């Protein structure tokens, strides 16, 4: 499964929810006919009754979610699609879910830790890298061609041009 978004908040009183998408274009999630929702027992297919765009948000109504209370119970659940449903990324393009877990080191072979999250900003995507030691700090590293020198998914490794002292 590839996480494409997360249920943010209820929308209205009839069971609709707002979905924070993790896709490049806001409406990309609507391209997939089958959505899966995270649960305590794993992934469950969810029946989407209606879906649309409202302003800068994706809104959805799921079968069986008929009021605000039911919608609120879905808050924080991830929405995903099966990996096989996604197109292959272009050269030097990556799905965020493929980057999470990669070991990050700089050109001086200093190990920073593993990518725990990727998020978008207005300028570029940002990698959240957390060291493995308990007291290790979190680093925010821009995911740009200038900084990211190599991504090796098979070796689960990323090389960045990012001096260690920039995080002090």
Image (tube, grey):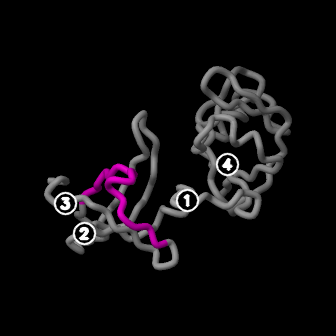
Residue 112: image x %, image y %?
Answer: 28, 66
Count of labels shown? Answer: 4
Which comes sooner in the sequence, label 4 or label 2?
Answer: 4
Which comes sooner in the sequence, label 1 or label 3?
Answer: 1
Residue 67: image x %, image y %?
Answer: 76, 28
Q: Secondary structure at mark 3?
A: loop
Label 3 and label 4: CA atoms lie apart by 36 Å
Q: 39 or 164, which lies in front?
A: 164
Residue 103: image x %, image y %?
Answer: 38, 71
Residue sitting at 70 percent across and 20 percent down? 12
Q: Identify the residue under disc 4.
A: 79
Instruction: Indicate left or right for 75 with 107 as reference.
Output: right
Marks 2, 1: nearer the viewer = 2
Q: 36 or 156, which lies in front?
A: 156
Q: Quick check: 98 above or below 61?
A: below
Marks 4, 2: nearer the viewer = 2
Which comes sooner in the sequence, label 4 or label 1?
Answer: 4
* Residues at marks 1 and 3 touching, judged by CB atoms closer than 8 Å: no
In the image, the segment drawn in magenta is 137-152
């Amino acid at each position: 499964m590839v996480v494409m978004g997360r249920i943010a908040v209820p929308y209205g009183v009839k069971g609709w929810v707002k979905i924070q998408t993790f896709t490049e274009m806001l409406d990309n999630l609507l391209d997939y006919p089958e959505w899966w929702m995270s649960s305590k027992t794993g992934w469950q297919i969810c029946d989407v009754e209606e879906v649309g765009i409202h302003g800068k948000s994706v809104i959805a109504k799921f079968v069986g979610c008929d009021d605000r209370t039911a919608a609120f119970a879905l808050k924080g659940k991830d929405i995903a699609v099966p990996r096989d449903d996604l197109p292959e990324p272009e050269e030097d393009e990556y799905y965020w879910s493929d980057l999470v877990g990669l070991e990050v080191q700089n050109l001086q072979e200093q190990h920073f830790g593993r990518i725990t999250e990727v998020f978008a900003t207005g300028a570029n995507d940002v990698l959240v890298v957390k060291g493995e030691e308990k007291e290790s700090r979190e680093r925010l590293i821009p995911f740009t061609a200038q900084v990211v020198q190599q991504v090796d998914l098979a070796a689960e490794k990323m090389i960045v041009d990012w001096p260690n002292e920039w995080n002090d």
